Structure formats: structure tokens, C-alpha cells
Image: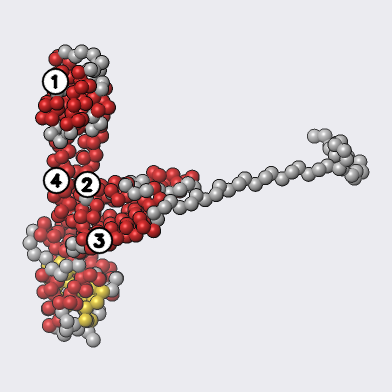
């Protein structure tokens, strides 16, 4: 059966016979940017119009076997042309001949170019454009936007914790009792910013600032403000504290908007992961893995300890116990569970996350309800089977040191070694 070898080049595609003669050729049409996009499509295995045209031309000339050097491209063409055999060989006989004799023969026959440097300059321009297109597509991935957004949320949390500590110490000079009565940083800063002087801490004012606060708790804060032992503070000093508190409130609002953005983006990028563990934890896993695709390629055992790399390597180095979970400890069913159940729940969750990540990255099918149902069923089994903590292992007793060997005699010095004749003195050097 006559065989044709289809070889792709930067500027066109050519078909060669067994002797290396050109059966037919098709040059890429359009500007350099369009050609760069076509080359990217060929790398992905997508048949472009020029290749389809060449296959039809070669088939019409009686060639029933077509050999390419790209497995995915050959598979896709074979599904389009059922009446010819299309297979892949890497490298192929025709491809070797094309590359070996390109400068001396095929460059002129295909493109009419005699100077190699003219061909090289055109190829250089097109490949640079292709590289730029690839970089742009990588930068346009939505999962990388999500990864940066969750890093921004973490930055806001760190900044807000530092600012809240400073505000508590600063405002505590005036109203120290508020430190114990209001533990939440956001509520503390809201009261500070809205009410200012402790004389304004009445039950009505407190409930206006914090509508969800209970009557009893508001009364305790108001009574503490009346009996406070803190120093008096002028309005001039309070204005400085309020200015600093306003920055905290702005950061709090920015964090809220970032969380809403992440939630909406996760619906589009990773709906299965979002449904399974929530948008923030899912985004944090994507960030730690370096992207959704990388997360999908990780085994469940690695997903289980993402975020606990330092503890894992320390355990490997020192021979201690490895961590049972990483950042997935934030999952409510894990951190609310007893200590001896957390590792088993983390393992079950990591297995479902691995499946959800693959579905989001490769298929796009929404299978989260089924995964969540199976996960909750497994968690219930763990809570039932391991309701009680396992018995502690008995500590290994230290082996007693062997008693020193008894010497002959009654406590005197050991007997001298048997004599072997007089020893000759060592020669002087």
C-alpha cells in the first residue's frame, strides 16, 4: 500500500513519498500572528484547514496510508477520514528525510527561498509571536486570579490583626474593661470608631452599632464604661485613634469584597471544589498547589497535607510523626472532630477533593452533590466506629544496663597478662 509522510513545518505542511519526493504541499496563509495561532493548534493536536486540505489531496492521489509525527493529531484526523489509515510514528521516515535535507533541497522546493537566513528570520518572528500567545493564555487563566485574590485576603487578615492589637492597646488606656467584654476585633473597632469616649457607651448606642448584640451583654458593657478605671482621654487623642480605626474598617470592607469576588469566580472555575469545601478554602488549596490543573494532578495524600510542608519535612528529617492534615483543617468537620478522628476525616476529604479537582479541570461535570453525600456518609461512619479514643500504647521500658563483669580475687587489681618474654626496646629515631 502506498504510504505518504505528512510533515509539519513553521511555514507550511508537506507530504512526502517513500523516496522523499514531494507529493503535495500547502503553505500557511495569513499574517504572522495567524500562523502562530495555527502552530499552537497543531501542537494541541487540532487539525487546521491546511492539514485537512493536504490529506484530501494526498488521498485523491491514491495514498491509503498516512504517517504523521503527532499522536493526538493523527488520532483526530483518523476520526475524520475513515477510508484511509492514519497513524503516528515519532520520528517518521519522511520527517527524518525532511529535516536532513531541508536546507539543501526542501527549503527551495517548498518556499522558493535559497538563503537560509531569510527563512530563519521569518521563523524567528513567528515563534516569538507564538511564545507571546502562550504566555498570554497562561496569564489569562482564572484560577491564577483566584490564587492572587486569596493571597490578598490573607494579607488583609494579617494587617487587620496587627491593627486590632494596636487599637486594643491604645484605646485600652481609656477603656481597659472593653478588652475582655468584646473579643471580636471587628466589633471592638466598630464600637471604638462610632462611639469614641466611654461616656457614650450606653445600651441604646451599643445596640445601634451592633444590632445583633444581646441586651444582657450590652448592659454589661455600659456598666463597665460607667465604672471604668481607665484614664481620661481628650477629643484630640480620640481623633487620632479614630483615624487609625478607619483604616481597619476600610480593610475590613475590602476583605469582604474580595471574598465575594472569590465566591463568584469559584462558581465558574471550580464549582465542585467550592460546593465541597467552600470558596475560600477551595481558593486557598488552588493557591497552594499553584493552579487548578496542578491541584488536579496531585494525589490525595499530597492534597491532605497542603499547607503543612514544614511540619512534613521536619518529621521526615527527625523521624517524628508526620502531620495528619494541612490547610484542610479549616474544614468544619475536621476541626470540630475529636483529635483521634481528624486524620481519618482529612484522608476522606482529600480523596473527594482530588476527584472534584479533576472534574473541574478536565470534564467540567458538576458532581459535587454526590461527592458531598459520600463524604458525609464516610464521616458518619468514622464518628460511629471511632467514637472512643484508642488505648494508649504502653511506653517501652528502658533495658537494664548489664552488670559489670566480676573480677577474680577479692577486689584487688586484675592479674597481669601472661609474660611473653622480654620485649626489645623500640629503636631510637
Report helix, strand or loop for mark 4: helix
Comparing marks 1 and 2, which lies closer to the viewer? 1
Neighbour class for label 3 at 10 Å: few (<14), some, many (≥20)? few
The disc at residue 373 is 3
> Given this view, does label 1 or label 3 mark the residue nearer the observer?
1
Q: CA distance from mark 4 to mark 2?
A: 10 Å
Please count the marks in the image: 4
Does dot 3 land on a helix, a strand or a loop? helix
- Mark-to-mark CA distance, 1 and 3: 51 Å
Residue at (21, 78) in percent of width and height:
86
Left or right of 278? Residue 321 is: right
Q: Alpha-carbon distance for marks 4 and 1?
A: 37 Å
Q: Is residue 429 left or right of residue 96?
A: right
Graded by Cα atoms within 10 Å as few (under 14), some (14 to 19) or many (20 or more), the crowding at tag 2 reads many
Q: Circle 2 sits on which residue?
A: 280
Tell me if I can see residue 98 in this picture: no
* C-beta proximity under 8 Å, tags 1 and 2: no
Residue found 10% across the figure and 59% down from its top:
34
Disc 1 to disc 3: CB gap under 8 Å: no
| First of labels 1, 3 by sequence position | 1
Q: Position of residue 51 (x, y in %)?
A: 14, 71
Amino acid at each position: 500500500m502506498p504510504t505518504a509522510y505528512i510533515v509539519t513545518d513553521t511555514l507550511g505542511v508537506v507530504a512526502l513519498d517513500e523516496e522523499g519526493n514531494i507529493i503535495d504541499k500547502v503553505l500557511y496563509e495569513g499574517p504572522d500572528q495567524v500562523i502562530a495561532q495555527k502552530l499552537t493548534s497543531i501542537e494541541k493536536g487540532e487539525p487546521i484547514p491546511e492539514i485537512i486540505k493536504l490529506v484530501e489531496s494526498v488521498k485523491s492521489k491514491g495514498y491509503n496510508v498516512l504517517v504523521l509525527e503527532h499522536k493526538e493529531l493523527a488520532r483526530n484526523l483518523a476520526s475524520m477520514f475513515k477510508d484511509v489509515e492514519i497513524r503516528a510514528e515519532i520520528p517518521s521516515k519522511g520527517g527524518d528525510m525532511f529535516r536532513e535535507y531541508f536546507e539543501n533541497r526542501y527549503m527551495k522546493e517548498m518556499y522558493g527561498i535559497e538563503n537560509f537566513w531569510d527563512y530563519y528570520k521569518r521563523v524567528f518572528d513567528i515563534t516569538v509571536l507564538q511564545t507571546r500567545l502562550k504566555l498570554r493564555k497562561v496569564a489569562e487563566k482564572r484560577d491564577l486570579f483566584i490564587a492572587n485574590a486569596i493571597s490578598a485576603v490573607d494579607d488583609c487578615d494579617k494587617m487587620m490583626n496587627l491593627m486590632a492589637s494596636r487599637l486594643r492597646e491604645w484605646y485600652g488606656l481609656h477603656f481597659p474593661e472593653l478588652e475582655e467584654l468584646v473579643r471580636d476585633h471587628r466589633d471592638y473597632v466598630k464600637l471604638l470608631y462610632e462611639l469614641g469616649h466611654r461616656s457614650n457607651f450606653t445600651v441604646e448606642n451599643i445596640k445601634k452599632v451592633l444590632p445583633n448584640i444581646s441586651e444582657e451583654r450590652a448592659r454589661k458593657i455600659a456598666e463597665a464604661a460607667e465604672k471604668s478605671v481607665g484614664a481620661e482621654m481628650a477629643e484630640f487623642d480620640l481623633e487620632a485613634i479614630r483615624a487609625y480605626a478607619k483604616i481597619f474598617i476600610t480593610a475590613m470592607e475590602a476583605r469582604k469584597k474580595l471574598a465575594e469576588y472569590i465566591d463568584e469566580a469559584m462558581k465558574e472555575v471550580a464549582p465542585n471544589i467550592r460546593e465541597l469545601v467552600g470558596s475560600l478554602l477551595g481558593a486557598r488549596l488552588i493557591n497552594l498547589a499553584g493552579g487548578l490543573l496542578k491541584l488536579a494532578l496531585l494525589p490525595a495524600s499530597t492534597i491532605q497535607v497542603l499547607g503543612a510542608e514544614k511540619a512534613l519535612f521536619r518529621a521526615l528529617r527527625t523521624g517524628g510523626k508526620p502531620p495528619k492534615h494541612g490547610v484542610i483543617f479549616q474544614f468544619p468537620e475536621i476541626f470540630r472532630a475529636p483529635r483521634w478522628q481528624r486524620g481519618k476525616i482529612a484522608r476522606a476529604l482529600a480523596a473527594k477533593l482530588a476527584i472534584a479537582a479533576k472534574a473541574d479541570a478536565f470534564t467540567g461535570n458538576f458532581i459535587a452533590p454526590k461527592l458531598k453525600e459520600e463524604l458525609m456518609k464516610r464521616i458518619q461512619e468514622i464518628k460511629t466506629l471511632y467514637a472512643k479514643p484508642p488505648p494508649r500504647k504502653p511506653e517501652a521500658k528502658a533495658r537494664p544496663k548489664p552488670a559489670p563483669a566480676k573480677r577474680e580475687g577479692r577486689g584487688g587489681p586484675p592479674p597481669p597478662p601472661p609474660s611473653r618474654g622480654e620485649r626489645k626496646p623500640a629503636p631510637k629515631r
